[in-house]
């Protein structure tokens, strides 16, 4: 199951990378790829934590951290890189 999750993440990452390297790409498709990656990261951490038997409060903290901290950091890097390409 973990390998399958990594495969999906890799596919989403490639879509995002393709959008990043192509400034003329449809902005809606770019935003959709970003949203899919964010949802995947949040869900994946949730699944891993529940399998480890962590309390629900800790799971919510982890999910919030990924969605609010890690994903925006990655998106900022992409925006800066896209501005450089323009």
Image (tube, helix red, strand yellow):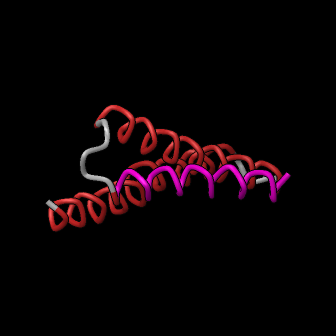
Q: Is residue 9 left or right of residue 51?
A: left
Q: Magenta span has 76?
A: no
Q: Is residue 74 left or right of residue 27?
A: right
Residue 54 locus on image (x, y percent) = 74, 53
Query: What secondary structure prevails in the magenta region?
Result: helix
Q: Is residue 39 left or right of residue 74?
A: right
Residue 9: quadrant of the picture: bottom right
Q: Is residue 64 left or right of residue 52?
A: left
Residue shown at 32%/54% (left/top)?
22
Residue shown at 28%/37% (left/top)?
27
Residue 26: quadrant of the picture: top left
Q: Magenta span has 15?
A: yes
**Number of numbered markers:** 0
Image height check: is 74 above or below 40? Answer: below
Residue 28: quadrant of the picture: top left
Residue 16 locus on image (x, y percent) = 44, 52
Image height check: is 47 above or below 2? Answer: above
Residue shown at 25%/52% (left/top)?
23
Looking at this view, is 41 or 85 the one in front?
A: 85
Question: Magenta span covers which residues?
Answer: 1-20
Quadrant in which the C terminus appears = bottom left
Looking at this view, is 7 or 73 the one in front?
A: 7
Residue 66 locus on image (x, y percent) = 48, 54
């Amino acid at each position: 199951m973990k390998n399958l999750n990594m495969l999906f993440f890799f596919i989403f990452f490639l879509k995002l990378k393709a959008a990043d390297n192509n400034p003329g790409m449809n902005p809606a498709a770019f935003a959709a790829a970003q949203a899919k990656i964010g949802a995947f990261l949040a869900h994946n951490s949730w699944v891993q934590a529940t399998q480890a038997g962590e309390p629900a409060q800790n799971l919510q903290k982890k999910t919030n951290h990924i969605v609010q901290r890690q994903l925006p950091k990655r998106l900022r890097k992409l925006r800066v890189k896209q501005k450089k390409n323009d």
